[in-house]
Image (cartoon, rainbow, N blue to C red):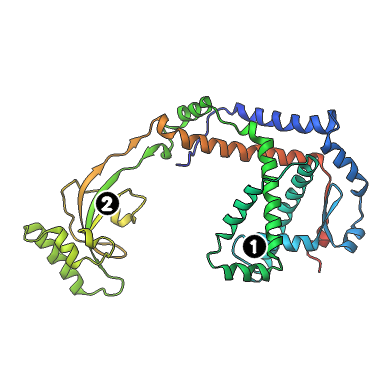
Amino acid sequence: MTPAGKPAQFPWRLLLYAVVILYLIGDLYWLGGPLRKRIDARKAFTHQSLQRALEEGWVATVNGEPITRGQLDQATNVYLFRRGKIPADLSPSSLNISRRVALQQLIDDTLVRQYAEADDFPVDPDAVARQIAAFEAQFPDPGNYALRREALGLTEEEVHDLIASQVAQQAWLEKRVAEAAAVTDADIRAWFDANAATDSGAENPPLVHARHLFLSTVESDTPERESLILDLHRQLVEGTADFAALAAAYSEDERTKTRGGDLGWFSPRRMPVDFCDIAFGLRPGKVSEPFRTSLGWHIVEVLETRAPERLDLDALKPEIAAWLETDRRRYAIDVLLNRLKTVAVVEVFPDNFDGK
């Protein structure tokens, strides 16, 4: 389930703003903490000329820390790498869009890293190891993983360092927004009361337990196929043959023919529309007329049905809590990043962005 609605009122958004902004104000303006000191230490380098940026190959500076064209190239490569692509796979316009997305991510990552370093935030080695394992598991063929990594000019150690850095940044962000993202039983109840009656995810769909006979028309669509399905239907109606026996002998659905054509329980979302239109229109114990779908000829017998049912709060509670927490965390991180950018000095040099 993915709740589609939200409560009519969102008092927690004020809490998100308060927690995030008070943290930044306290450190930057009242207490003169490590974040303030780190930014002050960088200010002497924030007013670089465009000429200097061009000469040095900078595409941006974040609190005076330069981001070079080479770093952007690597960030773009990593961005594409995670999507199973390399720059040569993209058109020039698509590559340009990817570079701009990668630059924004690079600026955000640099900001978060600076603040995490100012806090002396520790890195959990077990979390890093798990993330590395999860990332490499996306490439079932180790050879393909190595080839793509080498094509991007990255060593295995560099890939691991990038992952470790991102784990640290994410952990720092999570710590900063944990309080704002917390979900209480009252929050869950409020969402349920406001949305459960209308949200499609708060309902179990109707279900049908059926079996079928299937003759494919994908490779062979002849009059003989239609004659055969009509004859099988005649035998079922006259009671001269058993459905399971006919399925085992004639059905071309290899997954179900050995169990008498039994499809098990299914909802309208699981089967094609043209099949469900027939199956969900039958009462238990009824056998359909032969009908065609995009795949071939079918005969369906409905064995049992279940009506749709609304789910109660106890059944939905884990999913509502997970969705609310994810939504609040995403919102709180956006607020935090926007506040970091507000108090930071970020310069972008578009004249140097596509320079070679």
User: On the image, numbered disc 1 is attached to which residue?
Assistant: 80
Please give the name of the residue rendered at 48% of the width and 42% of the height, measured from the top-left corner: 2
Residue 307 is marked as none
Front position in the image: 232 or 150 = 150
Q: Is residue 29 above or below residue 56?
A: above
Disc 1 is placed on an element classified as: helix
Q: How many marks?
A: 2
Q: Within 10 Å of the Cα at label 1, are there few (<14), some (14-19), or many (20+) other Cα atoms?
A: many
Asked which quadrant contains residue 10, the reply is top right
Q: Within 10 Å of the Cα at label 2, are there few (<14), some (14-19), or many (20+) other Cα atoms?
A: few
Asked which quadrant contains residue 246, the reply is bottom left
Q: Mark 1: which amino acid?
A: Leu
Front position in the image: 43 or 179 = 179
Q: Quadrant of the C terminus?
A: bottom right
Q: Mark 2: which amino acid?
A: Gly
Asked which quadrant contains residue 174, the reply is top right
Disc 2 is placed on an element classified as: strand
Q: Is residue 203 above or below residue 250?
A: above
Please give the name of the residue rendered at 78% of the width and 64% of the height, measured from the top-left corner: 354
Q: Is residue 288 left or right of residue 49?
A: left
